[in-house]
Every structure is written in C-alpha cells, then in structure tokens.
Image: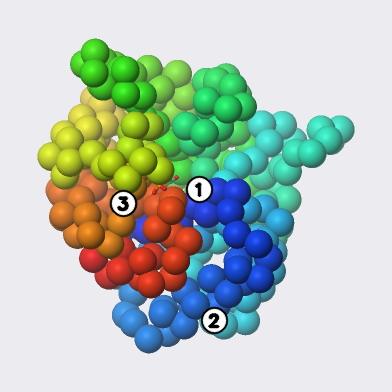
C-alpha cells in the first residue's frame, strides 16, 4: 500500500514574513484535521528552511521538510552551493532532483542529476526525481520515449536498493504554472507507463511500492480526480501550495 505524498514546492516565492505565516497556517490546518493517511511536505527556498524546520519541530508537526535542490558535489570550494550534508543537518529529509526548471534554466543534465542523487542518498535523504516532457514532445508523440530517456540516463543507473528509497514526480512541462493540467487519463497513462518501466527493470516489489507524484497545475478543483487515478500517488504542487487553504484542500482531496 503506497502512502500518498502531497508536497508543496514553493519555488523562489514569498518574502520572509509570508513564508513564516504560511508554515504557521499549514500547521494550524494540520492540527484541525486528520492528515494521518497522507505524508505532507513543504519545500521552501533554502533560506527559509531552518526556521521552517524549527517551527515544525516546536509545533510537534508531522510535516516533512524538503529541499528544492542540492549540490552535485560534496562540501568544498563551490561558492554559492548547498550540499546534501548541509540539507541533512538542517532537518530536511527530501530533496527535489531534476525539476524541469533546473534542467531548462540551469542546464542540469543527466550526469549532474546522477551525481545529485548520489549525494542525496549518501545522506540518507529521499530524492524526489522529476521527469516530464515538453509540449513539442507530447505533440510529436514522443512523450513516452522522453521519459524513458530521463529515467534510463539517471534513475536506472542505480541499484534496486537505491531506487526503493526514491520518489518519482511526473511533471509534464507544458502543464507547469500554466493553469493547464494533464487530464486524469493522461496522468494515469503516464504514471502506469512509468510504473511498468520500473517493473521491467527492477521487478514488481519495487514498482508496486514506488510512489509516483503528479505535478503541473494541480489545484483544489482538479486534485480529487487526478489523485483518484490508480497510479497517481500524490502531488507535487507549485502555485497552489503558496496558499494554506488551497494546499489543505489538495491534501484532503
Ligand atoms: P504548478 O503547480 O505551479 O504548475 O507547479 C508545479 C511544479 O512545478 C511543482 O514542482
């Protein structure tokens, strides 16, 4: 049985006061609800991570802290970078790797992403590996081969034991931040396809236990239908995670 995971990726948004208020409102909602059947994660910008963690800890919250990125290298002379061991020390337990914004704007390729996953696993953190096709790949019917390339060049380089510690997020790039989502059927088809490719490579135990999240304009209106699909095990939420009431509605969808 796969436990659903709803993770809010705040990206590079919110001022300090807004970020702290958002954490506090999310915890208030948690206290007033029963979220025990769902894992909930917040993934703020790095600079808000430690105070967010302290707030969550002091409040006795079960909300998981995640990181949007990490360095591909270990600690050392890499100005401006944040290492997986630093992320581990501030209390985060999940790290996004391979988000399309990192691939597209910062040229992160398979070799870099593979290193990042290695650093994350070395710290016993959970990588959330993001994959997804662009609109032109969808239109030319090469979305499945795009995803296979992204998986083969990074995730499938790891052992089954490593892969069993990962979460996959399917985020069609054409649906991110656009207000346009994949239809529930499109999401289910891709998630089933992704799961079957893990099945072929690693067998049924790993494939059946793998959590595959959907990301791309998930909101309170479309969440229930997307999340009711057999192979959709949760959501990676951008815009709608910046408002506590919307995030709550998705968690409870
Ligand atoms: P939106 O929910 O804003 O489309 O963002 C999705 C996303 O990229 C989450 O990582």
Dot 2: element = loop
Q: Residues within 10 Å of mark 1 (few under 14, many from 20)?
A: many
- The reply to whether callout 3 and callout 1 are in contact (CB within 8 Å) is no
The CA span between labels 3 and 1 is 22 Å
Q: Residue at x 38, y 72 (%)?
A: 245
Q: Which residue is disc 2 drawn over?
A: 60
Q: Residue at x 36, y 41 (%)?
A: 178
Dot 1: element = strand
Name which of mark 2 and mark 3 comes first in the sequence: 2
Q: Position of residue 70 (x, y in %)?
A: 64, 41
Q: Residue at x 26, y 42 (%)?
A: 181
Q: Is residue 2 visible?
A: no
- Position of residue 230 relative to residue 98, above or below, is below
Q: Which residue is disc 1 drawn over?
A: 126
- The reply to whether callout 2 and callout 1 are in contact (CB within 8 Å) is no
Q: How many marks?
A: 3
Residue 13, by quadrant, is bottom right
Q: Residues within 10 Å of mark 3 (few under 14, many from 20)?
A: many
Dot 3: element = loop
Q: Position of residue 1 (x, y in %)?
A: 23, 57
């Amino acid at each position: 049985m796969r436990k659903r995971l709803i993770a809010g990726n705040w990206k590079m948004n919110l001022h300090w006061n807004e970020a702290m208020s958002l954490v506090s409102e999310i915890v208030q909602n948690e206290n007033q609800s029963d979220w025990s059947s769902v894992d909930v994660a917040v993934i703020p910008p790095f600079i808000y991570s430690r105070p967010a963690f302290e707030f969550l800890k002091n409040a006795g919250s079960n909300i998981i802290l995640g990181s949007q990125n990490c360095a591909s290298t270990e600690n050392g002379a890499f100005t401006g970078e944040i290492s997986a061991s630093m992320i581990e020390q501030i209390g985060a337990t999940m790290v996004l790797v391979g988000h399309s914004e990192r691939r597209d704007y910062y040229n992160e390729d398979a070799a870099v992403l593979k290193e990042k996953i290695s650093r994350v696993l070395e710290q016993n953190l959970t990588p959330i590996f993001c994959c997804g096709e662009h609109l032109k790949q969808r239109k030319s019917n090469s979305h499945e081969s795009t995803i296979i390339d992204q998986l083969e060049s990074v995730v499938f380089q790891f052992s089954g034991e490593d892969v069993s510690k990962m979460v996959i997020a399917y985020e069609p790039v054409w649906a991110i931040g656009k207000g346009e989502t994949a239809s529930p059927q499109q999401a289910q088809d891709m998630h089933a396809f992704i799961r079957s490719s893990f099945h072929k490579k690693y067998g049924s135990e790993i494939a059946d236990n793998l959590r595959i999240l959907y990301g791309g304009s998930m909101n309170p209106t479309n969440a229930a239908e997307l999340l009711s699909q057999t192979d959709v095990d949760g959501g990676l939420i951008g815009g709608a995670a910046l408002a506590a009431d919307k995030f709550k509605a998705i968690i409870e969808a």
